[in-house]
């Protein structure tokens, strides 16, 4: 998939969506005669190839499109799909608040290839009631009443120019107040271009929005330095929405109003904002090849956020995070729920499985930091991120980068902590004592 050009119309009161999407596809194998897209429960109404209607089948949560004749490997073609449906949870509707926003499961509101190792650019247009304000992927191009199909509607258009996996596509709309923070708080010495920051929320004053997201510029500068890669885009939008556990999208993050209030009252609560910002590199720009290596997204974002907290609030903040991680790993172990970080199957994860990927993942990165020392560890993180930016990764890629930066064979460490559960008790591995070490 090279590019999606999507036009989406949510109906907030009805909890439904309809739309059309043009796909630019390059045949990845010889004699390609069909392609499959994920559609979840969406109903596909029509598909055409360069204006000619195509046959298609909707089986389970996929649509299989039959091409009229096989396409040669490397050839590029364009399909257009028209669809409608009622997303189960991938698009959240809050009619009382006038809010609509997306949550991860893109195929519930837009037919896509829903695989973390497929990345494409995106033009996203969303038609919304004219009194709403929206944020979306990449850069805002315009918002105008001209193109809307109904009176009282306005179309918002964004362009995502860095190819990203489809699960990071989305937008949020509501009766939002917006504050722009161009390049605020960025250290002078840091010459890299900085994104325009947008903060939005309903019922939030300018001053409050600036307060909640006060450290965003500093976070982005910090993560860019750790990654050795500039922020991938020209804008970063953050929204406060009715209800979410927190979510990263390409160039965009959403957290809840309730959480925003906590941060406003105590800046030490900003870890989740940092976690979502870290995903702009670890998760979005460097993405696990499949969900069995999900810890490369979530363990990294959790760990990197704690290192931001260390930089912002001092060593104590980091040590407290490590102590919490350690306690959770011990609990997993005591309950017999500790598992390898590389999962065999991530189709129906439990809360304990999430704790393995997020919390143990972060803890293992902390152990590796302790084991290798600051210089080799951070050089390895930077080398890994630069090498794999715009691509997908497996755990072996990370191990190789850390072995190269440290000049050490880390197979025993990875065997103990990453490829198997029960690392707290493993014998014979190098650096056994580090399980109990202080940060
Ligand atoms: Zn995350």
Image (spheres, grey):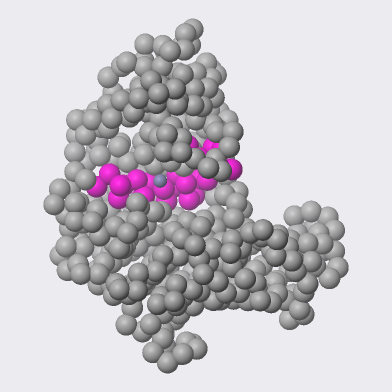
Up the image or down, 249 lies above or below 385; here it is below
Up the image or down, 255 lies above or below 98; here it is above
Splitting the image into 4 quarters, where does residue 11 fall?
bottom left
**Residue 192 seen in render:** no
Q: Horizontal and vertical percent for residue 430?
A: 46, 11
Q: Is residue 81 left or right of residue 321?
A: right
Residue at 49% in and 22% down: 421
Residue at 70% in and 61% down: 59
Up the image or down, 436 lies above or below 177; here it is above
Up the image or down, 86 lies above or below 166; here it is below
Residue at 27% in and 19% down: 438
Q: Horizontal and vertical percent for residue 255?
A: 31, 56
Q: Is residue 239 left or right of residue 163?
A: left
Q: Quadrant of the N terminus?
A: bottom right
**Tally of numbered discs:** 0
Q: Horizontal and vertical percent for residue 7?
A: 53, 76
Splitting the image into 4 quarters, where does residue 344 fall?
top right
Q: Quadrant of the C terminus?
A: top left
Foreground pick, 218 / 362? 362
Q: Quick check: is 341 in the magenta stretch?
A: no
Q: Is residue 361 left or right of residue 106?
A: left
**Residue 181 seen in render:** yes
Q: Horizontal and vertical percent for residue 253?
A: 37, 57
Which residue occupies the extreme bottom position in the image?
151
Q: Which segment is the magenta one?
A: 270-295
Residue at 80% in and 68% down: 67
Foreground pick, 404 / 94? 94
């Amino acid at each position: 998939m090279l590019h999606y050009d999507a036009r989406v119309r949510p109906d907030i009161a009805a909890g439904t969506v309809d739309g059309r999407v043009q796909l630019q596809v390059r045949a990845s194998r010889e004699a390609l005669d069909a392609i499959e897209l994920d559609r979840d429960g969406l109903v596909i109404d029509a598909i055409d190839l360069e204006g000619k209607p195509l046959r298609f089948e909707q089986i389970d949560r996929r649509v299989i499109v039959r091409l009229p004749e096989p396409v040669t490997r490397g050839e590029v073609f364009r399909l257009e799909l028209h669809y409608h449906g009622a997303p189960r949870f991938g698009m959240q509707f809050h009619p009382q608040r006038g809010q609509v926003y997306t949550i991860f499961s893109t195929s519930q509101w837009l037919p896509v290839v829903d695989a973390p190792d497929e990345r494409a650019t995106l033009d996203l247009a969303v038609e919304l009631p004219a009194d709403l304000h929206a944020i979306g992927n990449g850069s805002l191009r315009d918002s105008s009443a001209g193109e809307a199909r109904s009176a009282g509607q306005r179309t918002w258009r964004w362009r995502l120019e860095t190819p990203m996996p489809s699960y990071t596509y989305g937008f949020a709309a509501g009766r939002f107040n917006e504050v722009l923070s161009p390049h605020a708080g960025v250290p002078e010495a840091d010459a890299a271009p900085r994104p325009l920051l947008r903060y939005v929320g309903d019922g939030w004053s300018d001053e409050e929005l600036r307060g909640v997201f006060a450290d965003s510029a500093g976070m982005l500068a910090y993560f860019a330095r750790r990654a050795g890669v500039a922020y991938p885009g020209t804008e970063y939008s953050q929204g406060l929405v009715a209800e979410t556990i927190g979510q990263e999208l390409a160039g965009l993050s959403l957290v809840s109003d309730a959480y925003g209030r906590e941060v406003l009252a105590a800046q030490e609560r900003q870890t989740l904002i940092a976690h979502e910002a870290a995903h702009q590199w670890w998760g979005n720009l460097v993405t696990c090849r499949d969900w069995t290596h999900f810890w490369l997204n979530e363990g990294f974002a959790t760990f990197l956020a704690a290192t931001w907290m260390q930089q912002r609030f001092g060593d104590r903040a980091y040590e407290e995070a490590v102590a919490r991680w350690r306690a959770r790993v011990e609990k997993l172990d005591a309950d017999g729920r500790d598992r390898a970080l590389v999962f065999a199957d991530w189709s129906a994860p439990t809360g304990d499985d999430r704790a393995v990927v997020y919390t143990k993942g972060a803890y293992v990165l902390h152990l590796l930091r302790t084991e290798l020392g600051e210089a080799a560890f951070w050089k390895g993180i930077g080398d890994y991120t630069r090498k794999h930016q715009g691509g997908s990764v497996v755990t072996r890629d990370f191990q190789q980068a850390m072995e190269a930066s440290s000049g050490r064979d880390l197979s025993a460490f990875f065997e103990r902590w990453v490829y198997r559960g029960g690392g707290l008790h493993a014998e014979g591995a190098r650096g056994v004592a580090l399980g109990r070490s202080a940060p």
